[in-house]
Image: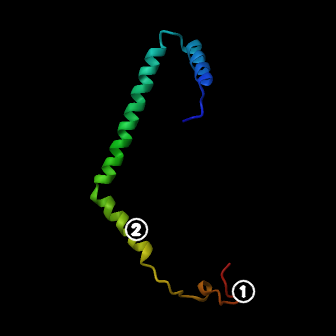
Amino acid sequence: MFGLGSLEIIVILVVALLIFGPKSLPKIGQALGRGMREFKDAANGMIKAIEDDPDSKDASAQKQHSATSYSSKPNDANQTGDASPDQKKV
């Protein structure tokens, strides 16, 4: 996932043990796990809300329609490439 091997994980755990001490490590682990779980639940809730929202489906359909509804005919000389260099906008 992060490219951490077993040796790197052991070093991180030893440094954390030295910095925080053995009594507070379980509390830190619980808080970290709880925070990650809440973040994951919130992210999943946002994804579900977006998927269930009928307005977001209409907006994406409108974006797709507007992207494909343009005209393929050029409407000025700059788009055709036939204009002289002094007529092109810089």
Q: Quadrant of the C terminus?
A: bottom right
Near mark 2 (Cα within 10 A), the count class, few <14, some 14-19 or many ≥20, is: few
Give how far across and how far down residue 73 sits, in percent.
51, 87
**Please, which residue is most extreme toward the right here?**
85
Give how far across and how far down residue 55 sits, in percent.
30, 60
Which of labels 1 and 2 is toward the front?
2
Compare residues 36 and 87 and report the one nearer the observer.
36
Read off the residue under disc 1: 85
Give how far across and how far down residue 1 sits, in percent.
54, 36
Read off the residue under disc 2: 63
Q: CA distance from mark 1 to mark 2?
A: 35 Å
In the image, what residue occupies the spot 32% across and 61% down? 57
Give how far across and how far down residue 67 sits, in percent.
44, 72
Along the horizontal axis of the image, is 33 left or right of 58? right
- Mark with earlier residue (1, 2): 2
In the image, what residue occupies the spot 31% across and 49% down? 49
Colour scheme shown: rainbow
Q: Amino acid at mark 2?
A: Lys
Give above or below for 35 relative to 17. below
Residue 35: quarter of image = top left
In the image, what residue occupies the spot 33% across and 52% down? 50
Near mark 1 (Cα within 10 A), the count class, few <14, some 14-19 or many ≥20, is: few
In the image, what residue occupies the spot 67% across and 84% down? 88
> How many numbered callouts?
2
Give above or below for 90 relative to 12. below
Residue 82: quarter of image = bottom right
**Please, which residue is most extreme toward the front here?**
6
Q: Amino acid at mark 1?
A: Pro
